[in-house]
Amino acid sequence: MSTGSAATGPHVLRRINATAVLNALRDAAGHTATVSDLVVATGLSRPAVTRALTALSDAGIAEFSGTTEHQIGRPAQRARFRAELGHVAGIDIGPHKVLAMVADLAGNVLAERQAASPPNPDMAPVLRTVLTEVAAEAGVTPADLWAAAVGTPGIVDHERGEVVLAPSIPGWSSLPVITDLRDWLGCPVGIENDVNLAVVAERWRGEAGDNLLFVQWGERIGTGMVIDDKPYRGASSAAGELGFIDLVTDLDDEPKPPADGLGAFERLVGAGEILRLGVQRCDRELRDRLTTDDDIAPLFDAAAAGDPAAASVVDTIATRFARGLAVQLLIMDPQRVVIGGGVSRAGDVLFDAVRRRLSRQLLVPVDLRVSALGAGNVALGAVRMALDRVEERLTAML
Amino acid sequence: MSTGSAATGPHVLRRINATAVLNALRDAAGHTATVSDLVVATGLSRPAVTRALTALSDAGIAEFSGTTEHQIGRPAQRARFRAELGHVAGIDIGPHKVLAMVADLAGNVLAERQAASPPNPDMAPVLRTVLTEVAAEAGVTPADLWAAAVGTPGIVDHERGEVVLAPSIPGWSSLPVITDLRDWLGCPVGIENDVNLAVVAERWRGEAGDNLLFVQWGERIGTGMVIDDKPYRGASSAAGELGFIDLVTDLDDEPKPPADGLGAFERLVGAGEILRLGVQRCDRELRDRLTTDDDIAPLFDAAAAGDPAAASVVDTIATRFARGLAVQLLIMDPQRVVIGGGVSRAGDVLFDAVRRRLSRQLLVPVDLRVSALGAGNVALGAVRMALDRVEERLTAML
């Protein structure tokens, strides 16, 4: 093992070993493992693992259990990562809602809470309230949080931790919200584009491969790419704006800037347009359900059950979506496409139709899947981003 | 220095040093340098550089010169890389022509020759004739070549060295042409997608940055991407097919497969369509020139000189091209766009119009440039690819 550093004394080596054992313990089932398990997982010697566990235990990061079960031979001493030692928050500031999650240090989500609120420069009180409530549900206070991360639409400047461009949200750029959150929480608060966080969640808990196109399909449409197992954000952190491609304006006309903040492709296949087409084409019973609940789920249920009007909406949307997605696939040639976001709940009735249309427009086949992560994927990605910040603090305790 | 290998004896180290000196010598102006220059360029000691030069000279790879010029103090002994020691060929098999170049081992192009021929499974005799002629012009025979590389439209399987899909060229897939060329030349013959080779040339001699979109715009339209300073080819080597995106078929219709092998966007803005619009709209004098020469250059000259019909063609093409390019820019967010291929010769009258239209459709600005490499860029990229194969042979001589 080479650290490439001059600081290679026994103290440093022990900290490296302890970090390796910590990671193996956290990733084990139930965050619990025997010394033998950890020897296998880390490749360290039994004495080195035992020393590392002692250090983790002294720091309060791990605890021993199972020593009382004396069986034949040596007792099978088990160690457990004390995931409850600290907490992080992941926050999704979406176009209509704030969704906050609190997780322990192993990434187990303990509580989540949602508040209806469009993003706006004066939303600090809303954020404070949601965070106070969700922290309480997880048994802590906001001041107990070790780190937090926020996902939001728009192009994020990672250096400055600011939204530099969010065409969909008037007044959302260069917000003081993150600064306020940092001051109030007194812990590191990261910020990232919402779709990029959905990709982070997909790589952590989902369907990712090392060359992936992820499409977040809801009111808005954004995409995130993973190339060579790394997120690809583009030269200005502005890659993946499929929602803004224009497939409808007559070619010899000049495209008009969007009046409603939605990109041209979002206006064509976003959840708002799906609802509009449903209300326009479906019979009164379904129409009433769509308008009352402001939810597109009944439309897809009706289409799956054979309702011809609902099926015609699905057909229109599948045709349009496949046309736009084909463009990005012809350009990127990813190994896999994963669809997340609200519309991903539509199920096979929509996605089988998309797959059929795609196959006729591509030069090479593609593996299209629906994400299993549901509507919490951005907040979950934010939890993962916050956990990355926590690792430094844990290591510093050793 | 760590080699990560058990083979680290003095012999191996000397070969590593000799290779470093060889590379520095080849890259020096005139492929000539003093020992002091090479000490600076390689970071090696003066005795190590002298030993390496002696080895290169013994192998016939370098030669000494300038030792007779006794000045005050020590003679400024100069060494020169013997670029004439061997030769490579770069071959562009385009939709209508074969263009072959022969270069020396430093990449200086000594001769180039073109033959009119569409790609076809029986074209081995054409290739042999062109290569024999271009080699003779460079003062060698085809059997003298150390390596060759071929650029061709289509999706190339690098493992098998075959074209696996070329929608534009009937019968071009799984060709025996490369196998025939290997047997005939008796040297390594690489194959690569033509646009990817144009990108290689751009990175070698042109305008590349570490995040680049290169657009080859001629009869066909293909794009190559450089991401993190590496060519990006996609999961199936099928990335960058901008020529196949469809911006015209009514969204609720099913796009039809192309009858003429051209992709939808190629049909809209390719050189063939530019010529067609010119013939359709321009007055008889210009029309006659366009049809006689089968060349679009007079059209852009006329537009630049204020001919309203020619200007209207440029306007139409700029509008359409900007719409398609905007799609790829919204998805990729590159730092720089470089336009190559035949249409890139159109000059500012076209590209200023493209830039104006692009700026209104993008979320972030982009730096759009016209390649300085001209129509030989694919063959030049093939020369570079062949040179990469030569390095092994040079090293083995040490």
Image (spheres, coloured by chain):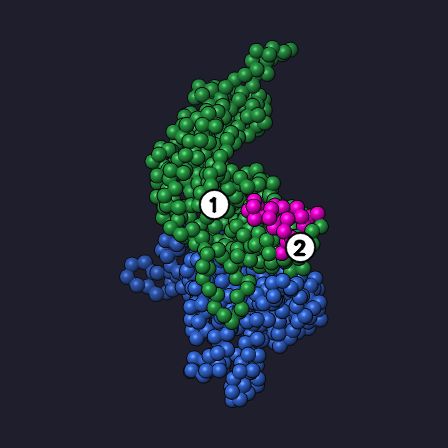
Chain colours: A blue, B green
Q: Position of residue A326 (x, y in %)?
A: 49, 62
Q: Which mark is drawn over residue B105?
A: none
**Observer-nearest of A24 and B307:** B307
Which residue carries the number 2 mark?
B309
Region of the chain picked out in magenta, as a range: B281-305
Badge 1: residue crowd in 10 Å (few <14, some 14–19, many ≥20)? few
Chain letter of disc 2? B
Task: Please say whether residue A31 is one of the residues in the magenta stretch.
Answer: no
Q: Of helix, strand and loop, which one carries label 1? A: loop
Q: Of helix, strand and loop, which one carries label 2? A: helix
Looking at this view, name the residue that lies furthest to the left. A72
Q: Quadrant of the C terminus of chain B?
A: top left
Chain letter of disc 1? B
Q: Position of residue A6 (x, y in %)?
A: 54, 39
At horizontal 71% and vertical 71% (from top left) the residue drawn is: A122
Looking at this view, name the residue that lies furthest to the front. B284
Which residue carries the number 1 mark?
B96
At horizontal 37% and vertical 33% (from top left) the residue drawn is: B185
Q: Amino acid at mark 1?
A: His
At horizontal 69% and vertical 54% (from top left) the residue drawn is: B308
**Observer-nearest of B98 and B372:** B98
Q: Is residue A1 visible?
A: no
**Observer-nearest of B190 and B57:** B190
Task: Please say whether residue B303 is one of the residues in the magenta stretch.
Answer: yes
Q: Position of residue A58 (x, y in %)?
A: 50, 57
Left or right, B43 with reference to A123 = left
Q: Amino acid at mark 2?
A: Ala
**Observer-nearest of A190 and A26:** A190
Badge 2: residue crowd in 10 Å (few <14, some 14–19, many ≥20)? some
Q: Nearer the viewer, mark 1 or mark 2?
A: 2
Marks 1 and 2 on same chain? yes
Q: Of the residues under marks 1 and 2, which one precedes in the sequence?
A: 1
